[in-house]
Amino acid sequence: MALFNVRVYGILLDEDQRLLVSDEFIRGNYITKLPGGGLEIGEGTRDGLAREFMEEANIEVHVGDHFYTTDFFQISAFNHKDQIISIYYLVHTADTTIVKTKAKAFDFLPQEVADPNGTAEHLRWIPLHALSEDTMTLPIDKVAIKMLIELFGK
């Protein structure tokens, strides 16, 4: 049976106009996406996004303005039966310098990606001027990034 899978993602910019992205290894696939993830039952979108940032970046965020919600049909890249609905918000935090990041994409240790069914995740900053739709792996993220680039220019 097909289901809706609701996802929440945050757009976090630092004082140097860099965007926080998540480089992940998921079930044998390398993807770059925005921080966030699946909404849990009983959870609001803003609370879910704040939880995701705590889990992924170990930071408290203030979830600000709504940025974008999926407005087209998108099947899940991982189970090929669920329809994905992604909701994006602008997020802010008191101190972006405490976010633990890597300088290069997919800078995983061999043991982090040894299990093809496992997962690994690192965060990375990308300057807005270096950002493109192709930076992101997932189709809905590409739309959000295109909108972000149009909003801020290059």
Image (cartoon, rainbow, N blue to C red):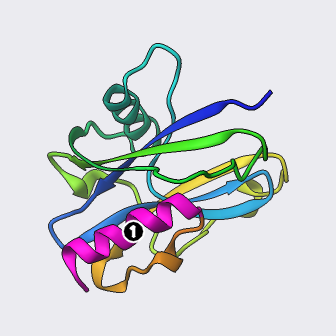
Camera-side residue of 116 and 44 = 44
**Residue name at image x 78 percent, y 47 percent:** 80
Residue at left 38%, top 79%?
A: 131
Q: Nearer the viewer, residue 52 or 97?
A: 52
Q: Position of residue 14 (x, y in %)?
A: 21, 63
Q: Is 105 in front, or is 33?
A: 33
Question: Residue at point 63% right, 63% down?
Answer: 31
The spot of residue 94 in percent (x, y) is 14, 46
- Residue 125 is at least partly visible in this image: no
- Does the image show residue 144? yes
Mark 1 Cα-neighbour bin, 10 Å: few <14, some 14–19, many ≥20? many
Residue that carries the numbered disc 1 in the rendered image:
145
User: What secondary structure prevails in the magenta region?
Assistant: helix
Is 68 above or below relative to 105? above
User: Of helix, strand and loop, which one carries label 1?
Assistant: helix
Q: Position of residue 28 (x, y in %)?
A: 80, 58
| Residue 117 sits above or below residue 150 on the image | above
User: In this image, 25 relative to 21: left or right?
Assistant: right
Q: Based on the picture, tell me whether residue 29 belongs to the magenta stretch.
A: no
Coordinates of residue 1 in the picture (x, y in percent): 80, 27
Identity of the residue drawn at 39% across and 55% down: 100
Answer with the quarter of the image where residue 54 lies. Answer: top left
Q: Identify the image quadrant of residue 3.
A: top right
Image quadrant in which the C terminus is located: bottom left
- Count up the numbered dots: 1
Which span is picked out in magenta?
A: 138-154
Please give left or right for residue 120 compared with residue 123 in the image.
right
Residue 141 in magenta stretch: yes
Q: What's under tag 1, amino acid-wise? A: Ile
Q: Which residue is outermost to the top? A: 42
